[in-house]
Amino acid sequence: MESCPECGSAENVALTRSVLQCRSCGISRCRLCKNMWNVDHRCATSVALARSWEDFKDVATYEMQLRPLGFKRCPACQLACEKQDPLSCDHITCVCGHEFCWMCGEDRRVIKAHDNSYHHKRCPFYEPCDETPRLEKNCPVCQATGVPCMRPPQAHAARRAAIRQQALGLEVRRLREGMEQSDGAIITEKTEAVQRPEHPFNLEALSQLLCGGPLASCCRVLNSDPPARR
């Protein structure tokens, strides 16, 4: 039983339904975000959840929140989708235009252009195939990449490897930037220290810091003449 947010009337709604339609006031609302429902509804809650992803654990949490309400996420835009009739076709087209299989989430355009071996192995529509993947002229993904589409197990493994590589690159960049900022702060601190009035030989001390040698050799490295002493 659920209560209508508008009038408070109790409604008995099946878990597979994503819309709460009140028989008392006649207003329909999204069960996920409680906003008004329409055919082009894009759930604000699912958008917020999609933006909060950080790793695959968050994706699993997102899926767990959606499925009891009859939703599944679109593999392309990550927004919540629903199938109004449980007995209707499992070929789903999201409001973003992406087509996917309701049962396994694989790209329906790829499946249609190739064969049912491009469903996930746990999908009831999956059919095994031992043939080498081919470059299909009717497959938009093949035509976009110029190479034959990989079947789901290989495609998922490649995608995970790419995500790990990207994450590693971001971590290396973050560490490098942190080290550069730290080194810059240390040099600035030491430079300010040797330039204080209590240091009688500011230029000599600075050359030792920056060049590791006397002022004359430091200026040769910089291709400049040493400044005249006052």
Image (spheres, rainbow, N blue to C red):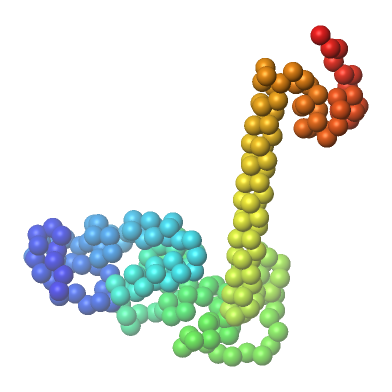
Picture quarter with the C terminus: top right
Which of 57/131 is in front?
57
Picture quadrant where residue 92 is located: bottom left
Using the image, determine if residue 205 lies above or below residue 23.
above
Residue drawn at (71%, 67%), measured in percent from left and top? 146
Q: Is residue 126 left or right of residue 174?
A: left
Picture quadrant where residue 184 is located: top right
Q: Is residue 7 left or right of residue 113?
A: left
Residue drawn at (46%, 69%), measured in percent from left and top? 57
Picture quadrant where residue 10 is located: bottom left
Which residue reaches farthest top?
A: 230
Q: Is residue 139 left or right of residue 214?
A: left
Residue drawn at (49%, 69%), measured in percent from left and top? 56
Look at the image and tell me whether residue 207 can be seen.
Answer: yes
Picture quarter with the N terminus: bottom left
Q: Position of residue 217 (x, y in %)?
A: 90, 28
Q: Position of residue 130 (x, y in %)?
A: 66, 90
Q: Is residue 44 left or right of residue 141?
A: left
Residue drawn at (87%, 19%), measured in percent from left and top? 226
Which of 63/26 is in front?
63
Q: Position of residue 214 (x, y in %)?
A: 86, 28
Q: How many marks?
A: 0
Using the image, determine if residue 220 lies above or below residue 228.
below
Using the image, determine if residue 112 lies above or below residue 166.
below
Look at the image and tell me whether residue 223 can be seen.
Answer: no
